[in-house]
Image (tube, rainbow, N blue to C red):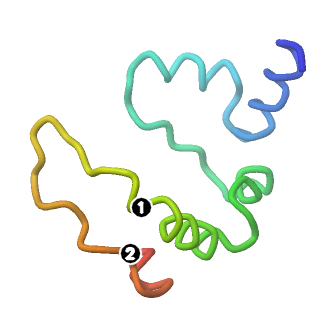
């Protein structure tokens, strides 16, 4: 992949926001809100994102640690038990 192809891929992911708007927003450090569902973005994780992320949590959570300079609370107690817990 060359730089032009990478830019085109990013542009497809952030539509209807333009690539230029995204690049202008990034240095501000604020969240970038991209309106609409966007089929390419929706396909990034899989058709079942909760299932994918919950499965990854089961494989990866134990070796990872919860770290923050100034934590505002205790680390998560464990994985969410279902889709509703995942979305909460």
**29 shown above or below 15:** above
- Please, what secondary structure does the residue beneath circle 1 have? loop
Q: Position of residue 11 (x, y in %)?
A: 77, 30
Foreground residue among 67 and 9: 67
**84 shown above or below 41:** below
| Residue drawn at point x = 70 percent, y = 28 percent | 18
Foreground residue among 60 and 8: 60
Q: Nearer the viewer, mark 1 or mark 2?
A: 1
Q: Position of residue 48 (x, y in %)?
A: 69, 74
Residue 9 falls in image quadrant: top right
In the displayed orientation, state which residue is furthest to the front.
63
Q: Which is more N-terminal, label 2 or label 1?
A: 1
The residue singled out by tag 1 in the image is: 61
Foreground residue among 85 and 18: 85
**26 shown above or below 39:** above
- Please, what secondary structure does the residue beneath circle 2 have? loop
Foreground residue among 28 and 68: 68
Give residue 26's mark.
none
Graded by Cα atoms within 10 Å as few (under 14), some (14 to 19) or many (20 or more), the crowding at tag 2 reads: some
The residue singled out by tag 2 in the image is: 79
Q: Position of residue 73 (x, y in %)?
A: 10, 58
Q: How many marks?
A: 2
The quarter of the picture where the N terminus appears is: top right
Q: Are marks 1 and 2 in contact (CB under 8 Å)?
A: yes
Residue 36 falls in image quadrant: bottom right
Q: Position of residue 45 (x, y in %)?
A: 68, 58
| Residue drawn at point x = 38 percent, y = 61 percent | 62
For marks 1 and 2, give the CA distance. Answer: 8 Å
In the displayed orientation, state which residue is furthest to the top.
3
């Amino acid at each position: 992949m060359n730089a032009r192809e990478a830019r085109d891929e990013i542009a497809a992911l952030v539509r209807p926001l333009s690539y230029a708007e995204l690049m202008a927003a990034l240095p501000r450090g604020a969240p970038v809100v991209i309106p609409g569902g966007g089929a390419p973005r929706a396909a990034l994780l899989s058709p079942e994102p909760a299932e994918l992320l919950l499965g990854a949590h089961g494989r990866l959570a134990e070796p990872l640690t919860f770290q923050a300079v100034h934590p505002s609370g205790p680390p998560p107690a464990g994985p969410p038990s279902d889709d509703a817990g995942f979305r909460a």
